[in-house]
Image: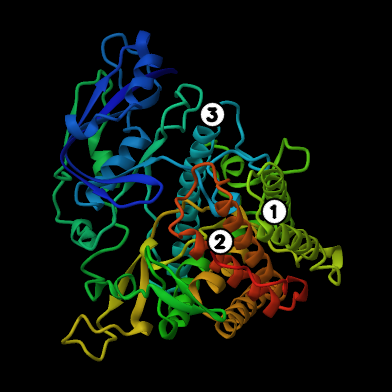
């Protein structure tokens, strides 16, 4: 067996850039794919050059290497029986996506788990030497790619399980990672911007999935390689549908939730502005939250629950890629990775306190508000450490770790509407919440391997609008988990306080310009201080009377 490197080149007809805060995202329309041999003597340099895709918009081409472990060594003509897996994925993605792919280039690494900071902190499991911003961006890219792959693995597992039970015929689609620039870390220049190709999922995908009886995929693939393989194998893989349009033509795209979000919403006692995407209106957010719990959260989590409790079913493997290193926190020894747990976030907050205290000590202008808030935040962290004193082990009831998305807002999902169940069949634009379901899940930039309650917490706090809705949601989730596993989820209150403290630290770092070029704040300083004060008041309402300090003066 000997290794061989090929170069796949996508010839593009159109390139459309989509808006994104931290990334560059493009929809690529592919008209032809060419496969060529690469010069073995120049493989390393060639591969590094291939990952520099800055000029793809001008050249209308995008190339990437394909590593082949060839099973024969024929002097005249290399031969393998089946195309490499990456080529199968590429052809399948082009066929299902109507010749379209998504290109994502990562530019920053600000995430919920690192308080939206764009530099490497000591608690990240992906800390490496070199430029902090580059390392944190690469950390996010690896985490997001691993998040997509694991979520797809879990959703497919659940899909098969449910089909066998003849319950739900369609599960939410998770795009496939066709290619990631930094999978092969031994041969890839890690100083470059990471990028990846994903399968495309749009409202016309069903048409592309119906088998028309032809032997070709209508994708022009030209091979100038000395390697030969049976392209019918790749064609068969490509035409294996995720679902058949003839069986599901009653499903139509639903744009209700993404197009009806409100920019100001009354949340947990106060009006909160959301100028970028908005939030689901108060009178609809509960039904929306229960839909994503049903269609996304529980299918993924129950797959992980099954893997954790079964001795015969192995947990997912990503072709030898160390996904836990990308998605986890560091253990105390700073050598091994572990899932994010409640008390791991307290360690993150202590690091944030150190940064804020150091900044306050060197500040040229004294701000009494910050002195008062820092003292309050020290008490908040101490209180979080004692939230579970009355529980066995002084920790939340144990639950197996899962992959968490952490941002299941409408802008990161697409939706189906079942017109067969709609009483207003003549008007396909009439939205009926109970007939709506999640079609696809995207944007795993916040993904982590963590306590499953983090996912539900963010839904309760960011999707829902008040404590009553959150308590109903938490109770529904708890009873479902208890029914299927006998595990205890525990109370919501300590988690809500943790999230509010988390929000305060993120805002205080932003107010002190300590994000290291992280997520660009949309708030002006008065808006920012006003939001800090509202979060403080929420902690008072949650029972922390020590947060009832003098109101912050908005300047």
In the rendered image, the quadrant that contains the N terminus is top left
Front-most of 352 and 4? 352
Q: Which residue is mark 3?
A: 131
| Sooner in the amino-acid sequence: mark 3 or mark 1 | 3
Give the image location of residue 112, x and y in percent: 55, 54
Front-most of 373 and 264? 373
Q: Residue at x 77, y 72 (%)?
A: 546
Category of crowding for the residue at label 3, using alpha-carbon neighbours closer than 10 angstroms: few (below 14), some (14–19), many (at least 20): few
Residue 321 sits in quarter:
top right
In the image, is 30 to the left or to the right of 51? left
In terms of secondary structure, where does tag 3 sit? loop
Q: Residue at x 76, y 59 (%)?
A: 375
Give the image location of residue 450, x and y in percent: 63, 56
Distance in Å between CA atoms under marks 3 and 2: 37 Å
Give the image location of residue 255, x and y in percent: 28, 72
Q: Which residue is mark 1?
A: 349
Q: Which residue is mark 2?
A: 303
| Contact? badges 3 and 1 (CB < 8 Å) | no
In the image, is 518 to the left or to the right of 351? left
Q: Residue at x 57, y 42 (%)?
A: 326
């Amino acid at each position: 067996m000997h290794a061989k490197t090929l170069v796949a080149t996508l010839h593009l007809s159109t390139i459309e850039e989509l808006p994104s805060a931290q990334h560059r995202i493009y929809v690529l329309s592919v008209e032809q794919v060419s496969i060529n041999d690469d010069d073995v003597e120049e493989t390393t340099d060639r591969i590094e050059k291939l990952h520099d895709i800055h000029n793809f918009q001008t050249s209308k081409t995008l190339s990437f290497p394909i590593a082949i472990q060839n099973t024969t060594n024929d002097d005249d003509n290399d031969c393998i029986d089946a195309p490499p897996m990456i080529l199968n994925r590429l052809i399948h993605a082009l066929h299902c996506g109507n010749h379209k792919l998504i290109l994502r280039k990562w530019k920053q690494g600000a995430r919920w788990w690192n308080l939206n900071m764009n530099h490497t902190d000591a608690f990240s499991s992906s800390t490496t030497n070199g430029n902090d911003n580059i390392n944190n961006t690469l950390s996010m890219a690896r985490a997001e790619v691993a998040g997509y792959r694991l979520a797809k693995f879990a959703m497919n597992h659940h899909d098969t399980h449910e089909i066998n039970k003849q319950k739900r015929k369609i599960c939410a689609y998770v795009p496939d990672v066709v290619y990631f620039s930094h999978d092969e870390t031994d041969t890839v220049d890690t100083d470059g911007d990471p990028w990846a190709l994903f399968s495309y999922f749009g409202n016309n995908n069903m048409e592309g999935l119906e088998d028309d009886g032809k032997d070709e995929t209508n994708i022009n693939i030209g091979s100038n390689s000395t390697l030969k393989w049976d392209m019918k194998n790749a064609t068969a893989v490509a035409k294996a549908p995720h679902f058949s349009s003839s069986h599901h033509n009653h499903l139509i795209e639903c744009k209700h939730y993404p197009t009806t979000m409100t920019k100001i919403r009354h949340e947990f006692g106060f009006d909160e502005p959301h100028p970028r995407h908005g939030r689901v209106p108060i009178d609809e957010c509960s039904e929306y939250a229960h839909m994503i719990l049903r269609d996304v959260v529980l299918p993924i989590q129950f797959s992980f629950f099954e893997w954790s409790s079964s001795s015969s079913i192995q947990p997912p493997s990503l072709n030898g890629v160390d996904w836990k290193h990308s998605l986890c926190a560091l253990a105390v020894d700073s050598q091994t990775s572990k899932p994010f747990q409640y008390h791991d976030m307290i360690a993150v907050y202590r690091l944030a306190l150190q940064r804020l205290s150091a900044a306050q000590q060197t500040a040229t202008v004294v701000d009494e508000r910050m002195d008062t808030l820092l003292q309050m935040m020290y008490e908040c962290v101490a209180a979080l450490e004692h939230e579970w004193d009355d529980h066995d082990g002084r920790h939340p009831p144990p639950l197996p770790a899962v992959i968490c998305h952490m941002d299941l807002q409408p802008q990161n999902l697409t939706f189906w509407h079942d017109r067969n169940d709609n009483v207003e069949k003549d008007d396909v634009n009439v939205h009926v919440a109970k007939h709506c379901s999640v079609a696809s899940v995207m944007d795993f930039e916040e993904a982590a391997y963590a306590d499953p309650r983090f996912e539900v917490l963010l839904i309760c706090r960011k999707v829902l609008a008040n404590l009553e809705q959150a308590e109903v949601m938490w109770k529904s989730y708890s009873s479902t988990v208890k029914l299927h596993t006998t595990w205890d989820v525990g109370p919501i209150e300590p988690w809500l306080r943790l999230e509010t403290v988390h929000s305060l630290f993120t805002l205080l770092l932003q107010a002190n310009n300590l994000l290291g070029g992280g997520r660009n704040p949309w708030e002006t300083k008065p808006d920012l201080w006003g939001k800090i004060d509202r979060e403080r008041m929420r902690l008072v309402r949650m029972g922390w009377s020590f947060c009832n300090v003098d109101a912050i003066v908005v300047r």
